[in-house]
């Protein structure tokens, strides 16, 4: 597969069933998570835990549709957005002209998790089109922060695997999706220097 295939777009994602769309987002932000602390070493364990907890909640929503409430996802998304805003503020602290690009990338990664949580919230409400847009945003923010062709390539691979699985297993809008069943996060090994 060429590395320039790119991440799935908001035009492509609606071809997947509801929870496969959210699994795509969850998988992307889970894969990107280690880069958050690498890019913002002073973030602290508590902020990393907020992101981790939100991703785990999104994954549970995929694995058991209806088991995670709209309110739980809303609260997780708000907590993650607070982390993103703290990172953005830290990126701009003391900067005269330009923010610290590495910390700003951490803010984008937190924003990716927030978008994934919002997508899951939309899926819980049955708004599949909005969920697809937010899922595309989630992986898009991670891709923008990482600027890694390897990330984009494995995200494309995730999308194609979810398409194939949804067809072979006849998934519908309420079919559960186990994100972990997609296999290794980096099937060909993490890129050089990951997660730095």
Image (cartoon, rainbow, N blue to C red):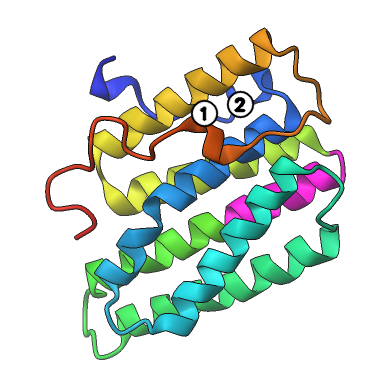
Q: Position of residue 31 (x, y in %)?
A: 40, 48
Residue that appears at 70% across and 42% down: 62
Report crowding for label 1: few under 14, some 14 to 19, many 20 or more residues within 10 A (C-alpha): some
What element does badge 2 sit on? helix
Vertical arrangement, residue 152 with respect to residue 25, above or below: above
- In the picture, the disc for residue 65 is none
Depth check, front residue: 68 or 99: 68
Q: Is residue 137 visible?
A: no
- In the picture, the disc for residue 13 is 2
Depth check, front residue: 139 or 37: 37
Vertical arrangement, residue 77 with respect to residue 100, above or below: above
Majority SS type along the magenta span: helix
Query: Residue 194 lies in magenta, yes or no?
Result: no
Vertical arrangement, residue 83 with respect to residue 24, above or below: below
Residue that appears at 57% across and 12% down: 164
Q: Where is residue 107 in the image (x, y as percent from the top left)?
A: 41, 68
Vertical arrangement, residue 112 with respect to residue 171, above or below: below
What element does badge 1 sit on? loop
Q: In which quarter of the image is residue 187?
A: top left
**Which residue, as the protein is rendered here, is positioned at the far top?**
168
Distance Cα–Cα, label 2 vs label 1: 6 Å
Q: Position of residue 98 (x, y in %)?
A: 22, 74
Q: Which quadrant does the N terminus fall into?
A: top left
- The range drawn in magenta is 115-126
- In the picture, the disc for residue 9 is 1
**Which residue, as the protein is rendered here, is positioned at the far bottom?**
94
Q: Which quadrant does the C terminus fall into?
A: bottom left
Q: Are marks 2 and 1 in contact (CB under 8 Å)?
A: yes
Depth check, front residue: 47 or 114: 47
């Amino acid at each position: 597969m060429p590395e320039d295939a790119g991440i799935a777009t908001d035009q492509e994602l609606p071809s997947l069933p509801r929870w496969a769309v959210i699994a795509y987002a969850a998988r992307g932000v889970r894969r990107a998570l280690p880069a958050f602390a690498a890019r913002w070493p002073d973030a602290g364990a508590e902020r990393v835990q907020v992101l981790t907890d939100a991703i785990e909640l999104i994954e549970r929503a995929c694995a058991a549709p209806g088991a995670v409430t709209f309110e739980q996802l809303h609260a997780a998304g708000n907590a993650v957005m607070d982390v993103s805003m703290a990172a953005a503020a830290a990126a701009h602290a003391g900067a005269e002209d330009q923010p610290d690009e590495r910390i700003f990338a951490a803010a984008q990664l937190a924003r990716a998790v927030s978008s994934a949580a919002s997508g899951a919230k939309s899926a819980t409400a049955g708004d599949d089109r909005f969920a697809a847009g937010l899922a595309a945003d989630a992986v898009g923010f991670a891709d923008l922060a990482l600027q890694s062709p390897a990330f984009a390539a494995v995200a494309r691979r995730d999308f194609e695997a979810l398409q194939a699985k949804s067809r072979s297993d006849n998934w519908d809008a309420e079919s559960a999706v186990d994100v972990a069943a997609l296999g290794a996060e980096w099937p060909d090994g993490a890129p050089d220097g990951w997660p730095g």
